[in-house]
Every structure is written in structure tokens, then in C-alpha cells.
Amino acid sequence: MAGPKDLDPSSSPRALLGAELRHAREKAGLSQDELGQRLFVSGSFIGQLEAGTRRMLPEYARSLDEVLDTGDFFRRNCGAAARSKYPDHFAEAADAEAIATVIKEYAPLLIPGLLQTSEYARAVFRAYQPTAPEDVINELLSARLERADILGDPTKPLLWAVLDEAVLRRETGGPRVMAEALHHVVALIRRHRVIVQVLPFSAGAHASMTGALTLMGFEDAPPLAFIEGPSMGRLEDDPATVTRHELSYDLLRASALPPRESLALIESVAEDYAHEDQP
């Protein structure tokens, strides 16, 4: 059969593509697991495509068109759904983050992107790319700040961050920038918009020594885990793998300072930077 018309890239192409996939799958009388078997993927992966939390790659689009008899609809439209302003290794995670109902993050070195100020983010990008033209840095900065718009809703997503003490102590952008950045985190905590704990140096070895970890939960899709390194990232949907990372995060929270003590420490370090910035 002929597929529907092309998706409008100005809307939310990944969500629309997911809705079309669900419609075509149900019309074909297949469950998510049954369709997954035809594509040699899990049923949860199909669910994530339908929810828009995973990117539809061309090889899956071709197989879906064949199995669901949709002409070349998914092949034609998967390109629009894959466009992103974020680096390739982070694009899927950013899209998932935007619709997550729960985000739990461990940050070993940097204030998490959703909590960064403009000047702090600029200092980070400039450190990553010391010779990049200013317009490149500005594009990165714009995308980073746009991500934080999801915190404009007073209730969702629930954001719980565990910051290694190194995040507070590593001076990024100078004392003024650090003071402003930490005061911004404090303000979000005091508005009851985020929950933040600090993992102190005194905690010693912990469950996520290898790097950053983000866990995301959704209303109508299985949870995801995102593991990030320098210019690379991996989005995990295997239930056993996600469960293992959730345990690691629970152990991190257990080793971290309680929220009230964490807030006091962040405020104290912020004041130290503010005083350091005075002539």
C-alpha cells in the first residue's frame, strides 16, 4: 500500500514517525515483540521507536517498509527524524531527555548540561575546542541552553543529580563564572525544582568510577541508560544492563551527602569563589 505523506520537519518528526509506526504495526496486527522478531530487535526497541526515544536508522526503515507494506514511507522520512543540532554521539540521548519523566544523572567532572549557566557552558566548549570559530561555540551554546528549557515546567521531569566533589572544586571559567554557576544550582534546589547530592572525596571508591551516567524513565516506553565519554556515548535499552546501571546509581546516592548537607557544601564553595573574585 502507499504510505502517508512525508512528515513535516518543522514539527516533531521523530514523534510523528513513531506514531505512524504504531499505526502501521497495529494495522498489520503485530505486537511490538512480533515486529521486533521480524527485524531481529527486541520488542522494547520497537516501543522506543514508537515513543520517539530512539532514532530510526535507514536499515530499520527499509525493513519496516517491507514488513509493514508501507511502500517507502519510513525510508523517505527517517532522514528528517534523524536531524539533530547535537553531536551524533549525543543526539539520541538529547531527544530521549526531552520527553523523559525522570532523569537521574551522575556527573564526575562537570555541572550537568541541564544545570549549566551560559558562561559556564561557554568555558566548557572553549576548553573542548580552543581553536573553534566563535560562531561554532555560539551554536553549541545555543543548543546547550535550549536543552535546559525542559526545566521550565515546575513539576517534570524529575531531575536528580549526583555531583562528584570534583565538579565543585574544578575551577571552570574563573572564580566569577564558578560562583555564578553554583549559585544557579543552589537556586534550582531552593525552588524545589531539582534534587542534588554531592559525592565527597572522602567517599573513596564508588560504583561509577568509569565515568558519567544518565538514567531516563518515560511514561510509555522502557527506561534507558546513557553512558558518556570524550566525544562518544552509548544509549542502552537492554533491561538487564539498565537495571545494573540503576543499581550503580542507587549506590552512588547512598554514598553521597544527604541533600541538605549537599546544599550547604555547594553554597559554601560558591561563596568561596565569590570572595576569591573580589579585588
Image: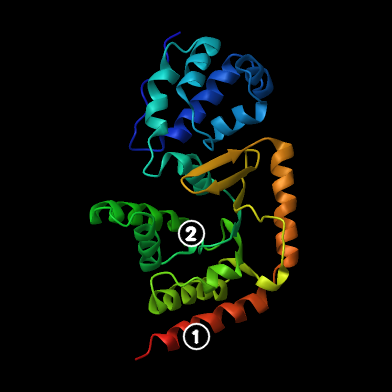
Q: Is residue 200 visible?
A: no
**Image: 42 above or below 123:** above
Q: Is residue 2 visible?
A: yes
Q: Indicate the position of residue 254 as horizontal and vertical percent values.
A: 75, 64
Q: Indicate the position of residue 109 as horizontal and vertical percent values.
A: 54, 62
Classify mark 2: helix, strand or loop: helix
- Residue 129 sits in which quadrant? bottom left
Q: Which amino acid is tagged 2?
A: Leu
Q: Which mark is residue 75?
A: none
**Image: 129 above or below 163:** above
- Count how many numbered circles sit on residues in the image: 2
Residue at the (74%, 38%) spot, across then down: 240
Residue at the (66%, 26%) spot, across then down: 43
Q: Are marks 1 and 2 in contact (CB under 8 Å)?
A: no
Chain-order first, disc 1 or disc 2: 2
Q: Which mark is residue 114?
A: 2
- Residue 119 sits in which quadrant? bottom left
The answer to whether 209 appears left or right of 279 in the picture is: right
Residue at the (75%, 51%) spot, across then down: 247
Q: Which mark is residue 272?
A: 1
Given residues 130 and 85, the one toward you in this image is 130
Classify mark 1: helix, strand or loop: helix
Q: Indicate the position of residue 136 as horizontal and vertical percent values.
A: 28, 51
Residue at the (47%, 13%) spot, across then down: 70
